[in-house]
Image (spheres, rainbow, N blue to C red):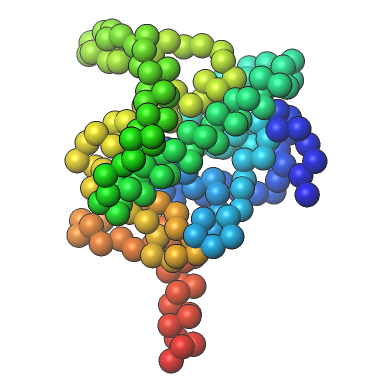
Amino acid sequence: MVTRSAGAVERSEPAYRFDFCGGHPAIDFTNTVGNRGDEPEEHLHTYGDLLAWARARGVVSRGEASKLARRAQDDVDAAGRALRRAVDLRETLYALMSAVVDRKKPEKQLLARLNDYVSDTFGAAHLAVEEGRLTLKTPSDDRLDAMLTPIVRSAIELLTSDGAARIGRCADKGCAWLFFDTTRSGTRRWCDMKVCGNRNKVRRFRAG
């Protein structure tokens, strides 16, 4: 049982290694819950867990992570709020991407929730020239939920592109992780063939 404060900088599961088989930052973020379709296993219990994921996925640099960790230690309550906001974004993205996979129209309430994050992310965005080309810049800040900015940006870029059709869901119903299908045929079925693919192969074999 996890007894640490949600805003704690320490990891709740030091030995747990985040999986990035989703192949896309925003999708990998939704996969921080294991066994979604069966018995969900939360892996973001503390702010330290969120920061560890962001650092491992390359969403924040080592220096940025250290800075955020120090701020979290000084304001545990704010770190807890940042974690709750991150979890809310994660579940919003999972529900919206699942609707895309199922070819359903997203609910208005769901879009409204995501649009709150879009407004926060792009509200003060501006175009700038960087290395000879135009780029969209969002304000750099040291808010404890700063790692959500690149997640939202990558999610919007994906959902508003042709790549949205490449979002898939693992065929293992107990897993239900999402992935970005980069296969030429567009027929990927498993989040990870070595895990869910093999597990289902064994099940079929035993079933005769």
Name the residue nearer the viewer: 66 or 122: 122
Look at the picture and state if 177 lies above or below 132.
below
Look at the picture and state if 163 lies above or below 132.
below
Q: Residue at x 52, y 20 (%)?
A: 146
Residue 205 visible in this rendered orientation of the protein: yes
Quadrant of the image containing the C terminus: bottom left
Look at the picture and state if 50 lies above or below 132.
below
Residue 29 visible in this rendered orientation of the protein: no
Q: Residue at x 55, y 22 (%)?
A: 145
Tell me: 50 left or right of 74: left
The quadrant in which residue 2 appears is top right
Residue 13 locus on image (x, y percent): 70, 46
Residue 12 locus on image (x, y percent): 72, 42
Residue 36 locus on image (x, y percent): 51, 55
All told, the count of numbered labels is 0
Q: Residue at x 44, y 66 (%)?
A: 172
Tell me: 147 left or right of 123: right
Q: Residue at x 20, y 60 (%)?
A: 185
Tell me: 183 left or right of 60: left
Tell me: 35 left or right of 185: right
The quadrant in which residue 114 appears is top left
Residue lying at the far bottom of the rendered structure:
208
Look at the picture and state if 203 lies above or below 185.
below
The quadrant in which residue 184 appears is bottom left
Residue 117 locus on image (x, y percent): 42, 24
Name the residue nearer the viewer: 74 or 183: 74
